[in-house]
Amino acid sequence: MNIYLKKILTSLFTGAILILFTLKFVQAHDLEALLKNSSDGEEKCLIFSNNGTYEYPTRHNWGTGPLCGFPGGKTALLANEQAVWKLIHLESDLYLILNSSNGEEKCLIFGNNGTAYYPTRHNWGTG
């Protein structure tokens, strides 16, 4: 992982709590990854809960084992999409972080021109 991507993931959450996420690439050629965090002592993945319908991402662990304990292994995890993040390198230290768990691929953004406290998904349309 390059240093710029690590910087982006470190600053994913702002405010009083800074959470460092680590990457586990599940399909490196597509840059699909799990974003994991162990700040409470348990490794959890960043997901959109409730089968991808929650507005804000949260951390979750389904049980014991690799891939945050997701049942059914990598194939099932990729099909579920709640914890799968696509990282697209734009230039220099700029990346798009996308998630498709609600049925539409959308970018992870901080709304209100970057001032929102929590990140949400957004799609600006075609372009």
Image (cartoon, rainbow, N blue to C red):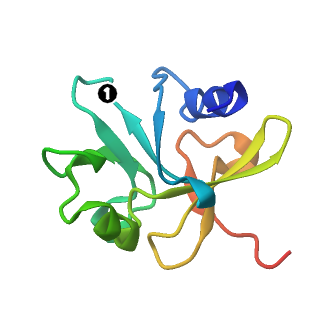
The x and y percentages for residue 57 are 43, 51
Q: As shown in the figure, which amino acid type bears the numbered disc 1?
A: Ser
Identify which residue is drawn at 22% across, 23% down: 41
Q: Is residue 37 above or below residue 55?
A: above
In the image, farthest residue toward the front: 29
Q: Is residue 115 above or below residue 126?
A: above
Identify which residue is drawn at 68% across, 69% down: 123
Residue 116 in view of the camera: yes
Identify which residue is drawn at 39% across, 58% down: 48
Q: Which class describes the residues within 10 Å of circle 1: few (<14), some (14-19), or many (20+)?
A: some
Query: Which SS class for mark 1?
Result: loop
Q: Is residue 75 left or right of residue 71?
A: right
The x and y percentages for residue 72 are 20, 66
The x and y percentages for residue 75 are 33, 69
Q: Name which quarter of the figure residue 59 lies in.
A: top left
Q: Is residue 78 or residue 38 the one in the foreground?
A: 78
Quadrant showing the C terminus: bottom right
The x and y percentages for residue 117 are 56, 39
Identify which residue is drawn at 58% across, 34% down: 9
Residue 53 in view of the camera: no
Q: Is residue 51 left or right of residue 106?
A: left
Q: Name which quarter of the figure residue 78 lies in.
A: bottom left
Quadrant showing the N terminus: top right
Q: Is residue 16 left or right of residue 58?
A: right
In the image, farthest residue toward the left: 64
Q: Is residue 27 or residue 61 the one in the foreground?
A: 27
Q: Is residue 103 above or below residue 83?
A: below
Q: Which residue is mark 1?
A: 38
Q: Is residue 119 left or right of residue 110?
A: left
